[in-house]
Amino acid sequence: MLAAALRTCAAEIDTRTGHPDRARSALISARRLLRDSPNVFLEGNAAIAGLCLSLSCCDWNSAIEEGLRALRCAGESGNLRTELAARLNLGQVNLNQGRLDDAGRHLDEALRLCPRGGNAEIGVLDALAQASLARGDIGQCEDWLRRIDVVLATHDLPAAYNRYWGLRTKLSLLGRVGRWHEAADLVTQIGTSI
């Protein structure tokens, strides 16, 4: 079990550091070990590692397969963190592919699962804002972005990419509705805070 967990961690590290071939090899090795000694909790972790690897390689079909595998494992093991990661990533993949109903279903579940007041909540709220913008629901998009602002204002969070993706979504919204002066002000604000 420990060897499978370590190989899954190695796959995650290799994915994050831009070594997809090493990540794929570590993941194959972890899965071989898990075939010999099944553990649904670790299989879920391996599926999330595979999902992240697929996303980094822009292999959307494999990302969806891995995400669905992670959901099955989370359902069996009761691991809510695995389910949250799978739901958020599946929501984002479906959003990027224009499958807005599927995206919304996964993102609504991710919001239900995620702890309040942290970077995970910001990531889910931003993805929901993106989905609303893609549907043309400007009011709902603004509501999700306001919720991100509330989370940031009420919690002392470390700098994380989620905070900046929310700004990207806000800029997209301002451009969509032609509020160019607000967009310029936001760009100036971003420039001084980075």
Image: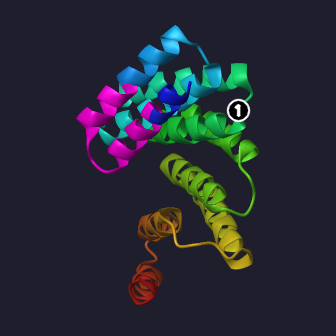
Chief secondary structure of the magenta portion: helix
Quarter in which the C terminus is drawn: bottom left
Where does the magenta region start and end?
7-27
Residue 19 on the magenta span: yes
Q: Nearer the viewer, residue 180 or 20?
A: 20
Q: Is residue 104 visible?
A: no
Taking the image as shown, residue 46 lies to the left or right of residue 138, namely: left
Residue 124 position within the rendered picture, expressed as x and y whole percent measured from the top left: 61, 51
Q: Is residue 119 above or below residue 45?
A: below
Q: How many marks?
A: 1
What residue sits 51% from the left and 16% below the top?
34
Residue closest to the far front: 2
Quarter in which the N terminus is drawn: top right
What residue sits 57% from the left and 59% below the top?
138
Q: Is residue 142 above or below residue 3?
A: below
What residue sits 65% from the left and 60% below the top?
144
Residue 173 position within the rendered picture, expressed as x and y whole percent measured from the top left: 48, 65
Q: Residues within 10 Å of mark 1 (few under 14, many from 20)?
A: some
What residue sits 51% from the left and 40% below the top?
89
**Residue annotated with mark 1:** 79
Q: Is residue 16 visible?
A: yes
Name the residue type under label 1: Asn
Residue 55 on the magenta span: no
Taking the image as shown, residue 115 lies to the left or right of residue 179, namely: right
Residue closest to the far top: 36
Q: Nearer the viewer, residue 123 or 160?
A: 160
Residue at disc 1, secondary structure: loop
Q: How is the image coloured?
A: rainbow
Q: Quadrant of residue 150?
A: bottom right
Q: Nearer the viewer, residue 10 or 162?
A: 10
